[in-house]
Image (cartoon, rainbow, N blue to C red):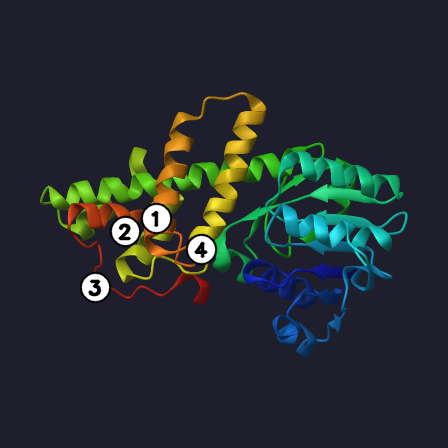
Amino acid sequence: MRIGFIGLGTMGGAASLNLIKGGHELTVCDLDRNRGKAHLELGAQWADTPALAAAGADVIFTMVFGPKQIESVLRSENGLLSAIQPGQVWIDMTTNEPTLSRALAAEIHAKGAIAVDAPVTGAVDGARNGNMTQFAGGDEATIERLRPMMELMGPVHFMGPNGSGAITKLASNQLWAIHATAMGEALVMAVKSGVDLKRAWEALKIGASESWCMHHDAPSVFQGHYDPSFTLDLCMKDLNLIVGACDAAGTEASVTRLVRDRFLKAQTTYGGDKGELHVVKLEEDAAGLSLQMEGDWVPHWQK
């Protein structure tokens, strides 16, 4: 297929390489041309604007920071809406506000094109290795038709009509933030009570306490870098979207609101550019101990 890919950040840059390696023709676009160096070396073309990235494409992917950025990509001069043609498919992988996701989809549909919201999870190693989970909302027949291409980047889960993918991604990040905060509290409590850290970690990776965080993210704490591949600023952006979705749904979400407060404290204490797992460091510092541990901890974005 001929594919336009807009947004070559940490996740988008890695995921789009898998489309090229899978044999598809890509035209890539980003605010920073240097991010497209590897893509161009593999035969991709460069586009200076979203409109040019869409020209002649069968499918256009977008993956940018958040709602403000995706709205600009679509609605600005030389944006996607100025160029998209009937029959083209727009797949947005941005973690977006569900109401905006549906509104932009409606504008795409009015042009005779098709919109799919398919935000992703799985961290940088998932994007690099073609194991980046996609939560897809939109026309099911279109998603099934495009599944073989999309699955070059990772598993695709059909969630329902437009907006369903956006909501599912927020729910996924909601649980991650809760788990990350709880992981820090549990490990600190165990270690301060006299349990060996390595033994505690091995035990808490099984049974009722098992989680993605305990398997995938704890080593970033043990190594002491707290995962700079995803910042506290990004966490706060997502948590504000999540709380907004809870408000829109009319749910109490008391734990989620407490967790947002913890991430806000981490952002204020350590800086928004610091790694997401500094929410665990808050607990370490309050207890006066460190969870750093000797080991062969290869950063996940290098795997």
> Which callout, 1 or 2, points at the residue further toward the start of the chain?
1
In the rendered image, the quadrant that contains the N terminus is bottom right
Numbered tag placed on residue 231 in the rendering: 4
Q: Is residue 256 above or below residue 34?
A: above
Amino acid type of disc 4? Thr
Nearer the observer: mark 1 or 2; the answer is 1
Up-down: is 290 above or below 301? above
Q: CA distance from mark 2 to mark 4?
A: 14 Å
Tell whether label 1 touches label 4 (CB within 8 Å): no
Mark pair 1, 2: CA separation: 8 Å
Tell me which label, 3 or 1, sits earlier in the chain. Answer: 1
- Structural crowding at the residue carrying mark 3, measured as other residues with C-alpha within 10 Å and reported as few (<14), some (14–19) or many (≥20): few
The local crowd at label 4, few if under 14, some if 14 to 19, many if 20 or more residues have their Cα within 10 Å, is many
Query: Which circle marks residue 266 in the picture?
Result: 1
91 horizontally vs 179: left or right: right
Q: Which mark is residue 294?
A: 3
- Do tag 4 and tag 3 residues touch (Cβ < 8 Å)? no
Left or right relative to 104: residue 238:
left
Q: Which mark is residue 281?
A: 2
Percent x, y for residue 56? 87, 61
Q: Secondary structure at mark 1?
A: helix
Kind of residue sitting beneath label 3: Glu
